[in-house]
Amino acid sequence: MKLINKKNVFPVVCMTYTVISITLAVLEVLETREMNPTQLNMFLCLLLSILGVLVLSQHYRLERFSPLAMVIIQYVVAVAVILISLKAASYITDVHPNGYRDMILSFSIPYFIGAVVYYISLMLEVRKQNRILENIKKDRK
């Protein structure tokens, strides 16, 4: 049985790279007892990626809404989490006056690209499943 094949080699490389990069950054922070801006940016990217994936993964809870409303609701929830987190962080450290805007932009562009890819993939998968169901129904007749 092959665990890595033509279909999943790219995701496996991406996951491996991410795990190694994050592990090395964590070990370096633990060793030096300080975090440089590059490491902070890497962890922030990881957290924003997790937030985006979590928000997109909850689409099934919003199926009663139109697809456009679903995307808008998901985006508003994600941005609200970011803004609340930044506000909480502002009590611990200084946030640049443009920090809120920059954070939303840093999240929004990759999020919308990911959302488009996710929803197109979802739509294609639903069509595929519908075709399979139609074939099963035809075979039963």
Image (cartoon, rainbow, N blue to C red):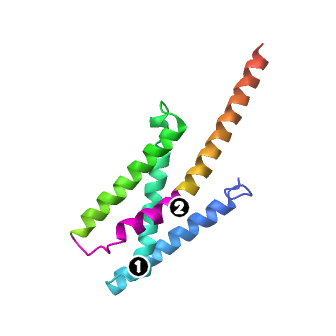
Tag on residue 27?
A: 1
Mark 1 vs mark 2, CA separation in Å: 30 Å
Query: Magenta part mainly helix, strand or loop?
Result: helix
Tag on residue 109?
A: 2
95 horizontally vs 76: left or right: left
Badge 2, how many Cα within 10 Å: few under 14, some, many 20+?
few
Q: Measured along the vertical axis of the image, is residue 103 above or below residue 29?
A: above
Q: Measured along the vertical axis of the image, is residue 51 above or below residue 37?
A: above
Badge 1, how many Cα within 10 Å: few under 14, some, many 20+?
few
* Residue 128 position within the rendered picture, expressed as x and y whole percent measured from the top left: 71, 35
* Residue 141 position within the rendered picture, expressed as x and y whole percent measured from the top left: 78, 13
Give the residue drawn at x 35%, y 53%: 80
Decide which of 100, 30 is in the foreground and name it: 100
Whether residue 65 appears in magenta in the rendering, the answer is no
* Residue 121 position within the rendered picture, expressed as x and y whole percent measured from the top left: 64, 46
* Residue range corresponding to the magenta coloring: 92-111
Labelled pair 1, 2 in contact (Cβ < 8 Å)? no
- Circle 2 SS class: helix
Q: Amino acid at mark 1?
A: Leu
Give the residue drawn at x 52%, y 34%: 66
Residue sitting farthest toward the top: 141
116 horizontally vs 132: left or right: left
Give the residue drawn at x 63%, y 66%: 13
**Earlier-in-chain disc, 1 versus 2:** 1
* Residue 55 position within the rendered picture, expressed as x and y whole percent measured from the top left: 45, 49
Q: Measured along the vertical axis of the image, is residue 77 above or below residue 139?
A: below
Residue 37 in which image quadrant: bottom left
Query: In front: mark 1 or mark 2?
Result: 2
Give the residue drawn at x 27%, y 67%: 89
14 horizontally vs 33: left or right: right
